[in-house]
Image (spheres, coloured by chain):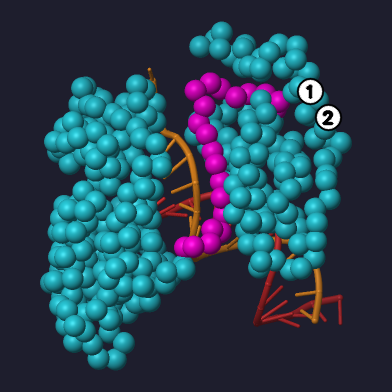
Chain colours: A cyan, B orange, C red
DNA sequence: TCTGGGGTCCTAGGACCC
DNA sequence: TCTGGGGTCCTAGGACCC
């Protein structure tokens, strides 16, 4: 691969069945077993990763546990503390960073690396093979690697051979290697969009790229999506690996699906207060301020709404929780809920904030909120810590 | 005992300002 | 009285990804 102009050599490195592989490292007895990562001893929830042996039975991530057990009644389901995943995440990044300073972390189990520099003295394929071998030997994880001139093509390439694959996609390989693939394999085309395309005869990437179909596809999925795919497939997209792209968060959120039904305002507020507390702690720990506060409510029919409100930048629990209370009072009307969530978005790092926000925070708690706190306290004093839920428990 | 949890990005309409 | 764009912020929702 020669490098004229700004042709770059990008690797996309993708850990194979990452969560399951980490679980095997912690418990080697799992190796070779039909198992998955999910909530242990439960039929609720979904699979977050399936071992290759389990995949052979049709089990895959996002599948409900109930469905998985119906396919494999004696499926082994394990869960692991998240810190194990982050530990191995850093372990494989350590190795990758020995080959380039241009490493962009894309998620817990994948990264982009610009190896243009080292490729001037060593063949990219040799570099990729060495990285793959070292991650397997030194960390114990297998990965697939895509080599291409852009991030998008590298991502598509790493997907083509798993596990332990290495796939090269140069611009001139696109017709051979990408065109035969299904439109469902396009990164960025998901389960809502690909059935629409397939229903209208756009089955392969070759179909998609055929100029005769341009009008029809734009009609189906819009101008923006069409151009996005069209140009990315041709290799006309960003080839800049930016180590800082995801280093600052734009939003943080938490949500929880409950075993019981939530159907009173006081319960909603009680749970959301715990979540808000958690979010504000995280906010402060990383020295962020938030501008937009949102709540998420999902009812028993799985209908989900989010409602938000923007205020001046703040990191003050009382101010933030007060907005949560406002949102609940405005939008919750005694429906039966199964999921609650709180999100903080429009985040700004302390040092990026206009000066006036950095002076000091005035202690604040609205009368409305103090009244609610009082009700909750009284309730608990009278009936005990879990009083709010006792009546539901009886019904279970 | 159907359907987790944490993110990013985009769209679209309305308000408001110039 | 009617009629303009452009830009930015806010809110709600949805698609997608891991």
Measured from the top left, where is residue A31 in percent x and y?
A: 17, 36
Mark 1 is surrounded, within 10 Å at the Cα level, by few (under 14), some (14 to 19) or many (20 or more) other residues, namely: few
Seen at 36% across and 54% down, the residue is A90
Seen at 32% across and 54% down, the residue is A91
Determine if the magenta segment contains residue A172: no
Q: Farthest residue in the top direction?
A: A394
Q: Which residue is mark 1?
A: A375
Determine if the magenta segment contains residue A264: yes
* Residue A303 appears in the rendering: yes
Q: Which mark is residue A182?
A: none
Seen at 21% across and 22% down, the residue is A73
> Distance from label 2 to label 1 (Cα)?
6 Å
Depth order, front residue of A183/A287: A287
Measured from the top left, where is residue A116 in percent x and y?
A: 27, 80
* Residue A67 appears in the rendering: no
Q: Quadrant of residue A132?
A: bottom left
Residue at mark 1: chain: A
Measured from the top left, where is residue A210 in percent x and y?
A: 23, 74
Q: Are marks 2 and 1 on the same chain?
A: yes
Quadrant for the N terminus of chain A in the image? bottom left
Q: Which mark is residue A371?
A: 2
Residue A93 drawn above or below residue A278 = below
- Badge 2 marks a residue whose secondary structure is helix
- Badge 1 marks a residue whose secondary structure is helix
Residue bounds of the magenta highlight: A246-266
Measured from the top left, where is residue A11 in percent x and y?
A: 26, 69
The answer to whether C11 appears left or right of A2 in the picture is: right
Residue at mark 2: chain: A
Q: Quadrant of residue A145?
A: bottom left
Depth order, front residue of A364/B7: A364
Evaluate if marks 2 and 1 touch, with contact meaning CB atoms under 8 Å apart.
yes
């Amino acid at each position: 691969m020669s490098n004229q102009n700004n042709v770059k050599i990008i690797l996309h490195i993708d850990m194979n069945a990452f969560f399951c592989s980490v679980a095997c490292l912690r418990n080697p007895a799992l190796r070779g077993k039909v198992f998955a990562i999910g909530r242990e001893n439960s039929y609720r929830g979904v699979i977050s990763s399936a071992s290759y042996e389990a995949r052979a039975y049709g089990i895959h991530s996002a599948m409900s546990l109930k469905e998985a057990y119906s396919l494999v009644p004696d499926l082994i389901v394990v869960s692991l503390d998240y810190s194990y995943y982050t530990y191995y995440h850093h372990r494989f990044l350590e190795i990758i960073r020995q080959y380039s300073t241009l490493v962009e972390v894309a998620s817990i189990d994948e990264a982009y690396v610009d190896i243009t520099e080292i490729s001037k003295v060593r063949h990219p394929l040799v570099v990729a093979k060495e990285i793959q071998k070292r991650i397997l030997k030194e960390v114990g994880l297998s990965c697939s690697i895509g080599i291409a001139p852009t991030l998008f093509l590298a991502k598509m390439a790493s997907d083509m051979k798993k596990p332990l694959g290495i796939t090269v996609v140069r611009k001139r390989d696109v017709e051979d290697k990408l065109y035969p693939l299904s439109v469902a394999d396009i990164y960025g085309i998901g389960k809502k969009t690909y059935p629409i395309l397939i229903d209208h005869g756009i089955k392969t990437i070759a179909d998609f790229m055929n100029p005769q179909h341009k009008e029809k596809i734009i009609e189906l999925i819009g101008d923006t999506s069409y151009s996005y795919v069209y140009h990315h497939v041709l290799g006309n997209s960003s080839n800049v690996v930016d180590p800082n792209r995801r280093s600052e968060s734009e939003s943080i959120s938490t949500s929880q699906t409950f075993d019981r039904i939530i159907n009173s305002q006081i319960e909603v507020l009680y749970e959301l207060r715990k979540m808000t507390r958690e979010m504000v702690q995280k906010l402060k720990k990383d020295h962020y301020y938030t501008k937009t506060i949102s709540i998420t409510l999902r009812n028993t029919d799985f209908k989900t709404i989010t409602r938000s409100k923007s205020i001046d930048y703040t990191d003050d629990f009382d101010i933030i929780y007060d907005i949560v209370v406002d949102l609940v009072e405005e939008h919750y009307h005694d429906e039966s809920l199964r999921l609650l969530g709180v999100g903080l978005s429009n985040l700004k790092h302390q040092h990026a904030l206009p000066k006036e926000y950095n002076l000091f925070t005035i202690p604040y708690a609205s009368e409305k909120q103090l009244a609610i706190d009082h009700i909750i306290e009284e309730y608990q004093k009278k009936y005990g810590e879990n009083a709010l839920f006792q009546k539901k428990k009886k019904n279970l």
